[in-house]
Image (cartoon, rainbow, N blue to C red):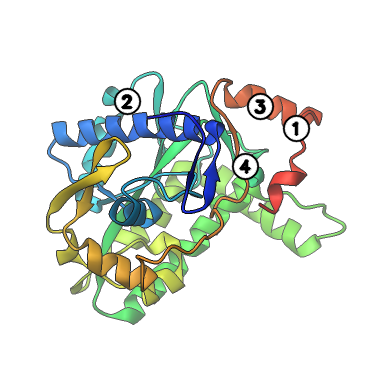
Amino acid sequence: MNLNSETRNGYTISSDMKKVWNIQMKMVVKLIDVCNKYNLKVWADGGTLLGTVRDHGYIPWDDDIDMVMLRNDYNKLLEVAPSEFQEPFFFQNVYTDKKYPRGHSQLRYNGTAAIIPFDVNCEFNQSIFIDIFVYDVLPKDKEVLLQAMRKAEFFRGMLYQDTYGKFPLITHPKAAIKYLLSKAYVAFNGYIKVYNRFQRYYTDYKTQMSNVVSCPMFGFKFVFDIQRKKEWYADTIFMPFEDIQMPVPIGYDEILRNQYGDYMTPVKAPSLHGGVIFDTERPYTEVLKDIKSGKIDIKKYLNE
């Protein structure tokens, strides 16, 4: 990848961001290679899918890579990941990194930093990453799905309280009580046990299933407003993305129209992560020290 700054669609991409993209591309190539080795299907998703189809590369204002797998292949990837992703790669999920509460995995590149402001006080690896999401087949009965999501969100809320929640007892008494109860429950049962319970509600429905797949952890609006047919992921085609061939699902047009409408018309959108603090040359541990000492002003990243 050319690391010089450039302008795309009237938006200037700095040389620093191109360096971030370059590291992310190394991780994408590694992920695709591992999936090919074990005959696992993985596809571009979200903004990465949009960028592949429309721009043949990154959307100019994007700062991450989104990949997705269906549950069976995703679980197989989890099995082989510890042996396949060696330094500088780190395959991150709750089973490999303490206090990582998210319902998907991230592939990280050690020796770098990608710090999301609300993760500053967290203990898990915060190197530059790509997201690996997982889609599950949904039950036909929407009420069954709704009840399962409510139960799952209850337990995920406990994990997030345990990881993120810190409230002064005097000024936020209700929030503090919720935080303390969550901490006690997670401490008694164990982080992974609570995580597995949260995940089980998304995968073990014991009812007639539909032909729709989605990612329930994205929330109620995503699941109920954006319906994706399983047949759209029945096969893979490859399209140019920067200087590689990116795997995309066969139903990419239906997927993009379903999520974005007229997706061929560029519309600038903010990062879902907010202002990420990137460093391609220093490990996240050093960058975190600079944030906590005040050398890096975290406030200027909060509203980006």
Label 1's element? loop
Q: Earlier in the sequence, mark 1 or mark 2?
A: 2
Q: How far separated are the C-alphas under marks 3 and 2?
A: 24 Å
Q: How far, Cα to Cα, is label 1 from label 4?
A: 15 Å
- Marks 2 and 4 sit apart, C-alpha to C-alpha, by 24 Å
Residue 205 visible in the shown view: no
Q: Position of residue 250 (x, y in %)?
A: 16, 58
- Badge 1 crowding class, 10 Å Cα cut-off, few under 14, some 14 to 19, many 20 or more, is some
Quickly name the residue at label 3: 287
Tag 1 and tag 3, C-beta contact below 8 Å? yes
Instruction: Specify the quadrant of the image occupied by residue 30.
Output: top left
| Mark in front: 3 vs 2 | 3
Badge 4 density bin: few <14, some 14–19, many ≥20, Cα 10 Å: some
The relative height of residue 287 versus residue 264 in the rendered view (above or below) is above
Q: Which residue is mark 1?
A: 296
Residue occupied by mark 4: 119
The tag earlier along the polypeptide, 2 or 4, is: 2
Residue depicted at 76% across the width and 31% down the height:
292
- Mark 4 falls on what kind of element? helix
Mark 3 vs 2: CB contact within 8 A = no
Q: Nearer the viewer, mark 1 or mark 4?
A: 1
- The reply to whether dot 1 and dot 2 touch (C-beta < 8 Å) is no
Q: Quadrant of the N terminus?
A: top left
Looking at the rendered structure, the kind of residue marked 2 is: Phe
Q: Which residue carries the number 2 mark?
A: 85
